[in-house]
Amino acid sequence: MNRSTTIDHPTNGARLRAIVQHANMQFSRQMQRFGAKYKITEKPEELNVLDEDEGNFFELDDSYLAVPIDQTTLTHAEAVRWVQDVLERSRGRELPGNFNPTIISELFWDQSGNWQELASTHVDRVASYCARFVKSLLMQLVPDDVFNKVMLHKVEPALKYRAEMAHAKLAEIMEDKDDHPITYNHYYTTTMQKMRADKQAREMKKLASDSTQLEYDHNEEEYKRVLRPEDLVKAIAAASVEQDMLKFSAEDALICQMAFYKVSKGTSQIFCIHC
């Protein structure tokens, strides 16, 4: 694409509102794709619901694609071990197979560790667009000698102050984000229930498949796989149970953290700047 045609190209500097709106959209998509410190792969099927709207299919400008942070890729098994390490360091009086609810706070703070830098970079970028717009406008309105004085003594201090206030507001938002998490969004409980139901359905599907056998159909003169109810009942009764209580707790805590992170990503919208 010809860079002169992009919305944030200097030749389009007069369209400040359009540029800022475009930057906000880019930032939102950037947060969707790169906001998580750990990108978890090779997940069980029931966790795919958490990957909806991850921003992978949105086009990002080069400036938002070149993120200033690194994203660590973990397999699901590696992510469970990450949570296990945190659980072991934070073990309290909870019974085996359960986890301290505050563990979700620590996991969320770690997972959202990229938010600060991404949001701060976005604030700086929008501030530069505003400065470029004001400078261009002033150059057209006043002579050069007046321009220099007004820029030095009035405009630049005002722009610097507004940028500082934007970063101060961001700091307040990040302070709230780093408090112990809480949500009233029904999506969290809905997602948890859906994932558990999908996991149960996946396990039942496998048990049903394992409980079939080939039988000859004399009417159609061919072999068919037939489900034997008595075999399915036996398979359900003999279904394996996770004996490692720490691993069981870690898998449950990881699911809770992933679901809460999905809900909390919506707060990234308040990092967007209005013009």
Image: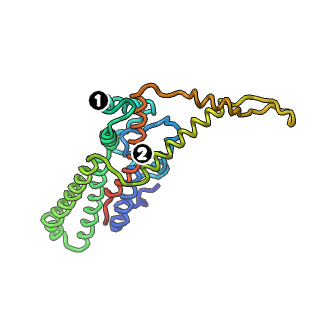
Residue 10 found in image quarter: bottom left
Q: Quadrant of the C terminus?
A: bottom left
Looking at this view, is 156 or 24 the one in front?
24
Mark 2 lies on a secondary structure that is helix
Image x and y of residue 33, in percent: 42, 47
Q: Residue at x 35, y 57 (%)?
A: 269
Rendered image coloring scheme: rainbow
Q: Residue at x 71, y 34 (%)?
A: 227
Q: How many marks?
A: 2
Residue located farthest toward the top when viewing the structure as drawn: 243
Disc 2 residue crowd, few under 14, some 14–19, many 20+, Cα 10 Å: many
Image x and y of residue 113, in percent: 31, 42
Q: Is residue 172 visible?
A: yes
Marks 1 and 2, how far apart in space? 22 Å
The three-letter code of the residue at mark 1 reads: Arg
Q: Is residue 117 visible?
A: no
Mark 1 lies on a secondary structure that is helix
Classify residue 43 as left or right of residue 103. Answer: right
Task: Residue under label 1, please give it.
Answer: 89
Image x and y of residue 88, in percent: 32, 28
Q: Residue at x 68, y 31 (%)?
A: 230
Classify residue 212 as left or right of residue 64. Answer: right
Q: Residue at x 47, y 36 (%)?
A: 41
The three-letter code of the residue at mark 2 reads: Ala
Task: Residue under label 2, please give it.
Answer: 259
